[in-house]
Structure formats: structure tokens, C-alpha cells
Image (tube, rainbow, N blue to C red):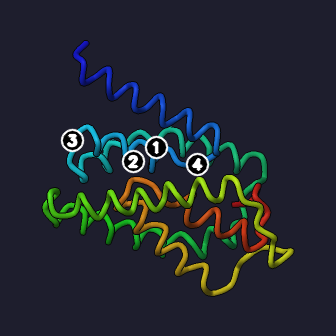
């Protein structure tokens, strides 16, 4: 095995340990590590999302089987999230990696701060029965865009906002 393959395995391992401890941040942490190793932004994002396909799919099936899916919320987030993801992926592949890399790095730094802040802060719930307002679609659009650009963002942006607005954490 070459050193670079071992580094990529280490990146995946460390990112998964962070994700396991916090319940989110695999994409943000692994993308940060990959960019620091010199991987172009589009390749880093694609690698992160390919790794997440299996784990996220299995997690989604598990939540569905346990009855932890709010289908009304899924319907409100699905299309805007996909549109945001497509637009983010298009921009990521259309702009030269050297130009967009500083912006992605700044985004990842901010997301890292958001994750750490939300991990150690108790936010009072503003609504006892969740968050299904019309703004949730905009939240899905933003979450999809941020996730595509930075390799992570759905958990720190969408999930944490829904929980802070009173949504049952099991149903996000």
C-alpha cells in the first residue's frame, strides 16, 4: 500500500470517529482533511459523497424501519434539497479548483465552528411540535447547496436548525 492510500484510509477513519461522536460532521471533517492533502475540491466532494451513499442509505432504511421518518417533512425538503445539491455540484465543477478552494475552506471553517458551538450549547426549543413552515423548503435548498459545495452541511445546517426549532431529533 502506498502512503497516500493509507492517508485516505486514515482520513475516513478519523472523520467517521468524529461523526460517531457528534452524530454529524463526516462530510465536513473528511472534506477538510482531503483538501488539506491537496485533493481538488470537486474530487474531494465526490469522494465524500460516494463514501456517504452506503452509510446514509443504510441509516435511512434503519430510520424508516424504526418509524423515525416524518414523511411530510421529507416531501418539503426533498425537491429543494436536490435542487440545491445540483446547483452546488454544478458550481463546484464549473469553477477552477484553485479559485474556489479558499471559499470552500472558509465555509468548512465556519461549519466546523457551527458544529462545535451546537455540540456544546443547549438551544431552547421554540415550537413544541416541530418545524413544517414554508421556510423549511428554503432550508432544504440551502442545506443541499452547502452539502454539495463543502462535502457536508445537511446535518449542521438542516438537522440542527430543525432540532433548534422544536422538531423531535428522532424525526429529523
Marks 3/2 in contact by CB < 8 Å: the verdict is: no
Cα–Cα gap, marks 2 and 1: 5 Å
Q: Earlier in the sequence, mark 3 or mark 4?
A: 4
The percent coordinates of residue 11 (x first, y second) are 39, 32
Quadrant of the image occupied by residue 88: bottom left
- How far is disc 2 from disc 4 in space, using C-alphas? 14 Å
Q: Is residue 129 above or below residue 170?
A: below
Give the quarter of the image for residue 162. Answer: bottom right
Q: Position of residue 35 (x, y in %)?
A: 28, 45
Q: For mark 3, what is the residue?
A: 38
Secondary element type, mark 1: helix
**Going 48% across and 37% down the picture, which residue do you hit?**
15
Residue 155, horizontal then vertical, whole percent? 57, 57
Q: Residue at x 24, y 68 (%)?
A: 91
Residue 63 horizontal side relative to residue 158, left or right = right
Few, some or many C-alpha atoms within 10 Å of disc 2 (few <14, some 14-19, many ≥20)?
some
Q: Earlier in the sequence, mark 2 or mark 4?
A: 4
Q: Which residue is disc 1 drawn over?
A: 52
Mark 1 or mark 4, which is nearer the start of the sequence? 4
- Residue 71's disc number: none
Marks 4 and 1, how far apart at CA: 12 Å
- Residue wearing tag 2: 49
Q: Secondary structure at mark 2?
A: helix
Q: Is residue 137 positioned above or below 64 on the image?
A: below
Name the N-terminal-most of marks 3 and 1: 3
Pointers 2 and 4 in contact (C-beta within 8 Å): no
Classed neighbour count for the residue bearing mark 3: other residues with Cα under 10 Å, few (<14), some (14–19), many (≥20): few
Q: Which residue is mark 4?
A: 24
The answer to whether the residues at label 2 and label 1 have Cβ atoms under 8 Å apart is yes
Q: Nearer the viewer, mark 3 or mark 2?
A: 3
Task: Locate the C terminus and report the quarter of the image it occupies.
Answer: bottom right
Of the residues under marks 3 and 2, which one precedes in the sequence?
3
Amino acid at each position: 500500500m502506498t502512503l497516500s492510500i493509507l492517508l485516505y484510509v486514515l482520513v475516513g477513519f478519523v472523520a467517521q470517529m468524529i461523526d460517531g461522536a457528534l452524530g454529524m460532521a463526516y462530510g465536513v471533517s473528511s472534506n477538510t482533511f482531503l483538501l488539506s492533502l491537496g485533493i481538488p475540491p470537486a474530487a474531494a466532494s465526490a469522494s465524500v459523497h460516494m463514501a456517504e451513499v452506503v452509510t446514509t442509505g443504510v441509516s435511512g432504511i434503519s430510520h424508516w424501519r424504526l418509524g423515525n421518518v416524518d414523511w411530510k417533512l421529507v416531501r418539503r425538503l426533498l425537491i429543494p434539497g436536490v435542487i440545491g445539491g445540483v446547483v452546488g455540484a454544478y458550481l463546484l465543477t464549473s469553477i477552477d479548483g484553485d479559485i474556489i478552494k479558499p471559499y470552500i475552506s472558509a465555509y468548512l471553517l465556519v461549519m466546523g465552528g457551527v458544529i462545535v458551538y451546537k455540540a456544546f450549547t443547549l438551544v431552547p426549543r421554540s415550537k413544541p411540535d416541530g418545524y413544517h413552515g414554508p421556510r423549511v423548503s428554503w432550508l432544504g435548498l440551502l442545506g443541499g447547496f452547502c452539502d454539495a459545495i463543502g462535502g457536508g452541511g445537511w446535518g449542521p445546517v438542516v438537522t440542527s436548525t430543525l432540532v433548534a426549532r422544536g422538531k423531535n431529533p428522532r424525526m429529523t
